[in-house]
Amino acid sequence: MVSSDQFKAHYEGVLTRIATACARVGRDPASVRVLPVTKTNPVEAALMAYGLGLRAVGENRVQEAAGKRPMAPSDLRWELIGHLQSNKAKHALQVFDVIQTVDSPDLAVRLGRLAGEMGLRPQVLLQVNSGDDPAKFGCDLADAPRLLEAALAQSALVVRGLMAVAPLSEDPADADRTFVELRLCRDSLAARFGVVLPELSMGMSGDLESAVAAGSTCVRLGSTLFGRRPSV
Ligand SMILES: *Cc1c(COP(=O)(O)O)cnc(C)c1O
């Protein structure tokens, strides 16, 4: 893993990239938050982020985050960015403040019921496979209205917006299209349901400029901050 000096330099580099991407499209850089993705790195990665004033980290596995969270300050928020199996929904609610990967009406209903029983009111994002990639999780674009309807019916869930992952591809146009489709999907859902869906979680180390141009409010950054992940 990187030293804290390296991490600081990487973080400053990321802020510069975001500022440049925002300037190109006339956005305020403060409208884009950096979510450091600490998966596969030790808890020290989360502590370094905390040390620079960041107050949320992303993890893709419930078990891994459960092991790290007790070692981190209690005001650090943990956000689930990996696929959630319904049998882990309860554990996920115990470990995470935000679940970015609600991808089916069944999962929304289950999370809503469990959160109600547990006296929680978690923020959630709906994961949409706006890149139409068979290898990616997320509901199909066409099913997004049904998913939103199910999530909005759960009074224990606070639906904040949408999340997408771009297809693995050599062609940057695939990421561009994925992100623009997610924003269009958000705009049409917001109009149709009369709700505000302010959060668009999209963009990673390799494609954050494209995501910011399309309206991302949350870039999920792992390798560009912490170095290449150890293979698992
Ligand atoms: C791992 C991961 C990231 C971070 O990826 P990098 O390319 O290392 O920045 C972002 N989002 C999701 C869903 C991930 O699983």
Image (cartoon, rainbow, N blue to C red):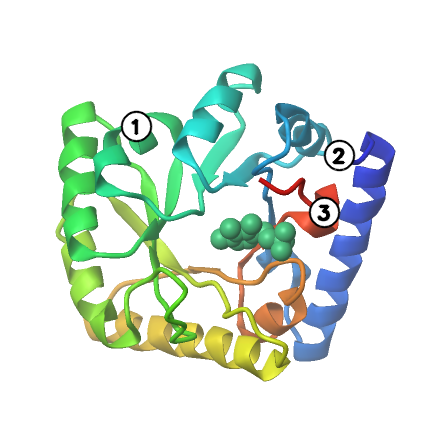
Secondary structure state at the residue bearing disc 3: loop
- Per the image, the residue denoted by label 2 is 1
Q: Residue at x 28, y 56 (%)?
A: 103
Indicate if the residue with disc 2 has its beta carbon within 8 Å of ligand 1.
no
Kindly identify the amino acid type of the residue bearing the numbered disc 1: His
**Viewport quadrant of the C terminus:** top right
Please identify, in this view, whether the residue under mark 1 or under mark 3 is nearer the observer.
3
Query: Which is more toward the observer, 155 or 13?
Result: 13
Q: Are marks 1 and 3 in contact (CB under 8 Å)?
A: no
Kindly identify the amino acid type of the residue bearing the numbered disc 3: Arg
**Is residue 213 left or right of 13 when viewed as pictured?**
left
Indicate if the residue with disc 3 has its beta carbon within 8 Å of ligand 1.
no
Q: Is residue 111 above or below residue 205?
A: above
Kindly identify the amino acid type of the residue bearing the numbered disc 2: Met
Query: Which is more toward the observer, 144 or 3?
Result: 3
Q: Residue at x 31, y 38 (%)?
A: 122
Q: Residue 200 has which mark?
A: none
Q: Is residue 230 above or below residue 76?
A: below
Q: Residue 228 has which mark?
A: 3
- Label 1 to label 3, Cα distance in Å? 28 Å
Q: Percent x, y for residue 25? A: 66, 78
How packed mark 1 is, by other alpha carbons closer than 10 Å (few <14, some 14-19, many 20 or more), is few
Q: Percent x, y for residue 143? A: 21, 71
Q: Residue at x 37, y 48 (%)?
A: 83
Question: Which quadrant holds residue 22?
Answer: bottom right
Question: Which quadrant holds residue 40?
Answer: top right
Q: Residue 91 has which mark?
A: 1
Q: Are marks 1 and 2 in contact (CB under 8 Å)?
A: no
Q: Percent x, y for residue 128? A: 35, 65
Q: Is residue 8 above or below residue 68?
A: below
